[in-house]
Amino acid sequence: MSERSFSEWLRSECEPDWTAVVTHPFAMAITTGTVADEDMRRYLEQDFQFVDSFTALLGAAVAAADTFEARVPYGTFLGQVATTEEKTYFHRALAELGGRTDAPTEPVTAAFLQLMDDVRASQDYLLIAAVLCVAEWCYLGWASRATEPLPENFVHREWIDLHEGADFRAWVAFLRGELDRLGAALPAEGGDERRQQVLGVFRRAVELERAFFDMAAGQTR
C-alpha cells in the first residue's frame, strides 16, 4: 500500500464504482430537485428499511470500539440523528409522496441489510467502521455536489441537508479517521490479509450503494 491514508486507499481501490455512486444521475437529480416523485418514493421506501439495521450497527460500533473516545461520537450520532432526524424525515417525506414504511424489500436492499447484519454480528470493529464509513462518506460525496439554491421541496432539500454541512462532515471525518487509525496499526508485514478483508467489505458496500441508486432509478446492471 502507498503512503495514502488507509481510508483513501480503500476508496481508490473501489473505482470506478465509487465515482459512479457520488456522481450517480439519480443522486444528482436529488440535488436539483428534478427526480420524479415515483422514483423518489421508491428510493425512500427502500432506504427506510435500513433504519433499524443501521441503528443496530451504530450500537455495535459503540460496543466494539476500542476506546472511549471512539464510543462517544457513535453514541451521539445514534441519539441525535439516526433515531430522530432521519426517522422523522422519512415519515414526513413518505407521507408527502404517498409512500409506505413497510414496502416489500428489493433484492439490493436485502443484500445490503445482510451485509450490515453480518458485520454487526461479527463484532469486528474495523469491519463495522468500514461499512459505516462507506454509507456516510459516499452520501456526503453526492450531497456536497448540491449548489445553492437548494430545491424548494423539503423532500429533496432536507435529504441533502441531512448528508451535508459542518456536523455531517465532522462525522464522516471521524469515521475516516477511525479507519486510518486502525489501518495504520496493522503490521507492515503480515497485515495484508487483514487489509484485504477490510477492502472486501468496503468494496462490497460500495457496489451495493451503486446498485441501490440503480434500483431507485429503475435501472439494472
Image (tube, rainbow, N blue to C red):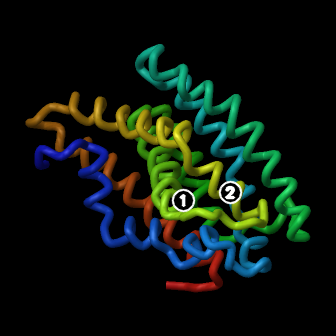
Residue that extends furthest to the front in the rendered view of this protein: 149
Gap in Å between the C-alphas at discs 1 and 2?
A: 9 Å
50 and 82: which is toward the camera: 82
Residue 198, horizontal then vertical, whole percent = 33, 46
Residue under the image location 34 percent in, 37 percent down: 179
Q: Please report the residue visible at 85 percent of the width from the left and 62 percent of the height from the top.
A: 94
Q: Could you tell which of marks 1 and 2 lies nearer the N-terminus?
A: 1
* Residue 209, position as x, y percentages in the image: 51, 64
Say which quarter of the image contains residue 220.
bottom right
Residue behind mark 2:
159
Residue 197: x %, y % from top left: 31, 48
- Image: 22 above or below 166: below
Q: Which residue is mark 1?
A: 143
Q: Amino acid at mark 2?
A: Trp
**SS for tag 2?**
helix
Q: Are marks 1 and 2 in contact (CB under 8 Å)?
A: yes
Residue sitting nearer the eye, 21 or 192: 21
Secondary structure beneath dot 1 equals helix
On the picture, is 76 further left or further right than 91? left
Residue 100 circle label: none
**Residue in the image at 69% along x and 71% along y:** 106
The answer to whether residue 88 is above or below residue 13 is above
Q: Position of residue 180 (x, y in %)?
A: 29, 36
Horizontally, residue 68 falls left or right of residue 2, namely: right
What residue is rendered at 27% in x and 59% in y? 12
Crowding at mark 1 (Cα within 10 Å: few <14, some 14-19, many 20+):
many
Q: Quadrant of residue 29?
A: bottom right
Name the kind of residue labelled 1 in the image: Ala
Judge the density around disc 2: few (<14), some (14-19), many (≥20) Cα neighbours within 10 Å: some
